[in-house]
């Protein structure tokens, strides 16, 4: 069961697409935090949408127009790839498809969300807004693919994040650090750790709890960032000790996964 606010937004998104691009969107599934029971009203909504066949350039023009109308009307981002049904019946590869991120619509082969984590979330946790049950889609899910994806992502993207946070924590001119960035770093790397260890996909909050179950010394840090996640607008910037603990966690997980 989707939260009313999210369901209303998805229903309106579909209605706009049906008006502007009639017949193009055949399926719509909620993924991300919404499917993983960890959605916050301030969060964007992650989706996987389906067209009958790979979208043509003409389809993409209509989908862009519909996306822009829906984004302006809803005042929130509903983002993700617009795939063909057959795309998920094979392991994810780079595909030239329409997609959006942070409200920006694109039609190219650079969609990061076409990956084994998205495939697994759709197959196991996806919520059908339009279309058959996700179990009937024949989505390919391979645990080795997920672990390899996590290893590659941690060894590149998250390693760079760790370097950035370490540099900030070591800066003698700084005494305060952004609370939401801290929350994003701690729970984001916890998700990588949890998936690498178990093969499953976790929400941010569940990943934080898993991290503490494996490494209890991170309990205070995880409690802090979970509180930020619940009410980010009510909390002060974090201090240097918290930033240093975040940097140490990032370093530890990067080393644990990549060696």
Image (tube, rainbow, N blue to C red):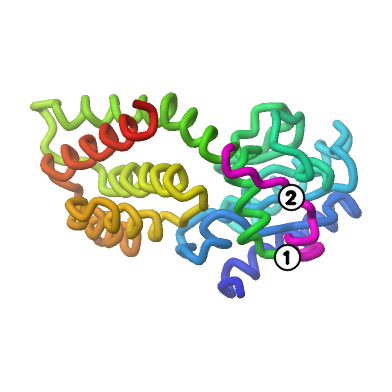
Q: Position of residue 254 (x, y in %)?
A: 34, 32
Quadrant position of residue 129: bottom right
Query: Few, some or many C-alpha atoms within 10 Å of disc 2 (few <14, some 14-19, many ≥20)?
Result: many
| Residue 129: mark | 1
x, y percentage for residue 215? 24, 51
Work out whether residue 40 can be spotted: yes
Q: Nearer the viewer, residue 48 or 99?
A: 48
Distance of label 2 from label 1 (alpha carbons): 17 Å
Residue drawn at (18%, 41%) of the image: 245
Is 137 positioned to the left or the right of 31 in the image?
Answer: right
- Counting from the top left corner in percent of width and height, residue 26 is at 85, 55
Q: Is residue 134 magenta?
A: yes
Q: Is residue 41 above or below residue 65?
A: below
Task: Spot the residue most to the left.
Answer: 172
Picture quadrant where residue 65 is located: top right
Give the residue displayed 46% in from the left and 63% down from the top: 38
Residues rendered magenta in the picture: 129-144
Residue 72 seen from this side: no
Q: Which mark is residue 139?
A: 2
Q: How many marks?
A: 2
């Amino acid at each position: 069961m989707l939260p009313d606010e999210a369901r209303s937004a998805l229903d309106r998104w579909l209605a706009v697409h049906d008006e502007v691009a009639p017949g193009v969107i055949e399926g719509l599934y909620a993924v991300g935090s919404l499917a993983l029971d960890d959605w916050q009203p301030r969060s964007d909504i992650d989706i996987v949408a389906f067209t009958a066949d790979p979208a043509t350039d003409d389809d993409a023009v209509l989908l862009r127009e519909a996306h822009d109308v829906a984004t302006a009307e809803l005042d929130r981002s509903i983002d993700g790839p617009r795939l063909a049904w057959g795309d998920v019946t094979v392991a994810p590869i780079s595909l030239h498809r329409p997609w959006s991120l942070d409200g920006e619509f694109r039609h190219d082969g650079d969609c990061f969300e076409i990956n084994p984590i998205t495939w697994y979330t759709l197959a196991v946790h996806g919520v059908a807004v339009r279309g058959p049950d996700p179990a009937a889609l024949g989505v390919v899910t391979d645990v080795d693919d997920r672990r390899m994806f996590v290893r590659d992502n941690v060894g590149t993207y998250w390693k760079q994040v760790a370097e950035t946070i370490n540099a900030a924590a070591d800066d003698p001119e700084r005494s305060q650090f952004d609370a939401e960035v801290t929350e994003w770093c701690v729970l984001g790397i916890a998700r990588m750790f949890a998936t690498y260890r178990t093969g499953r996909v976790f929400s941010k909050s569940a990943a934080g709890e898993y991290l503490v179950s494996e490494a209890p010394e991170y309990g205070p840090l995880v409690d802090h960032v979970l509180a930020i996640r619940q009410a980010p607008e009510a909390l002060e910037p974090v201090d240097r000790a918290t930033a240093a603990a975040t940097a140490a966690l990032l370093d530890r997980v990067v080393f644990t996964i990549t060696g």
